[in-house]
Amino acid sequence: MFSSTWNFLKRHKRKFVFAGAFVGGVYFLGKYAQKKIREMQEHEASVYINQARRQFHFESNQRTCNMTVLSMLPTLREAIIHHLNSENLTTLLKTKPANRLEIWEDLKIISFTRTIVAVYSTCMLVLLLRVQLNIIGGYLYLDNSVTKNGMLPLAPPDVQQQYLSSMQHLLGDGLSEMITAVKKAVQNTLGRLSLKQSLSLQDLEQHLNQIRAQVEKGVGGSVHRPLSWYMMADEENTLAAQACGLTANDVTTIKLLNETRDMLESPDFGTVLNTCFNSGFNRFLDNMAEFFRPPPGFEMNYNNLWKVILSLPVAKIIPIVNGQIHSICSEIPSHFVQDLLMIDQVKEFAANVYETFSSPHELQK
């Protein structure tokens, strides 16, 4: 029996060798495949967790942006009112002075100027904070993994504070230059407009478009300025301020400022900023429309015809326009600010900024 078995094995030795090699190969291949599948699953799980963590951090950062905007609006409002104080003029008018007509003319220019400046500066504040806080947010996300590897943080607290303090330009020199530009455009457009002349809502919109065209093309200012200058000082001024005794934090701050400036000067940012301007001025006109609406029971044969027919004297429009700053620059969430925060292009641009500065390739720069 054993000899017959041995003879059988000898006759089929090659087949058994191949069979054994095949079975062994299949076994080890299976083990290798299991290992690779496990590694792929672990990698996918790691990627998913990182994406979820990154998404959570981004959404948290956007909430911080919104709260920061609301917290800074009172400061912006007070700065505008400080430069364009119409309250003194309205108080003076109550005394019925001899130069009453002259005061009304000044009030006309100041009222329109400060409301238009409020629209512009609020839009700029919303977008500038979106850019700055998403750049910082991206670096902070990277810092969570960078510091674990013993590397220095990309955005230490001192740098964050120094970097975000550049916001003061919009509230200071930038705002002053913007007021000069807008006031000149308002004077050019509304200067000869009689206080007794009646304007429809459509007339008001046309005058507003004329003012915008001058401001946004740089016609009204003492010096031609790109819109980005109102939000951030020139690079030369930044370098001059930091010229003496640059520390490592100063170098990092200048790098952040230059990156921000690049963002503000990009065509994409210009498109989003213009979208915000359109939204802001449309909301302003919607607020004004409440005072032009026909009385109850008034019948109109054509939709929105009242915007053309119904009108108010300029003298009655001035106080309405003058009070709009309290609605535009309100720390209590208003339709004006909510409209800006909910614009899809603003959200997409913010996501792109965060994506750029929270990506590992930033570490290689």
Image: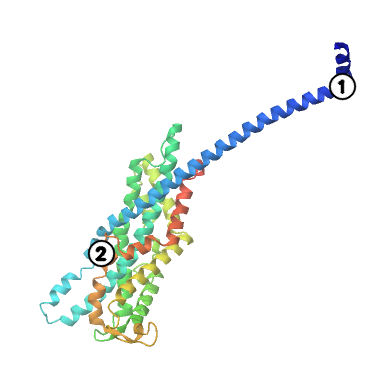
User: Given the image, on which type of amino acid does mark 1 rest?
Assistant: His
- Residue furthest to the top in view is 2
What secondary structure is marked by label 1? loop
Q: How far is the residue under mark 2 from the one under mark 1? A: 99 Å
Residue 255 appears in view: no
Question: Residue 139 versus residue 170: which sits nearer the camera?
Answer: 139
Quarter occupied by residue 70? bottom left
Determine which of the numbered discs, if any, sits on residue 107 in the image.
none
Q: Split into 4 quadrants, where in the image is the N terminus? A: top right
In the image, what residue occupies the spot 23% across and 80% down? 316
> Which picture quadrant has residue 17?
top right
Question: In this orientation, which residue lies closer to the viewer: 206 or 324?
Answer: 324
Indicate the position of residue 20 as horizontal and vertical percent values.
78, 23
| Residue 336 against residue 25 in the figure, above or below | below
Residue on which the image places disc 1: 12
Q: Please name which of the two marks, 2 or 1, marks the residue nearer to the observer.
A: 1
Mark 2 Cα-neighbour bin, 10 Å: few <14, some 14–19, many ≥20: many
- Label 2: which residue? 80
Give the amino acid at mark 2: Ile
Residue at 66% over, 29% down:
31
Q: Is residue 176 left or right of residue 23?
A: left
Horizontal side of residue 119 vs 10, given as left or right? left
Residue at the extreme left: 95
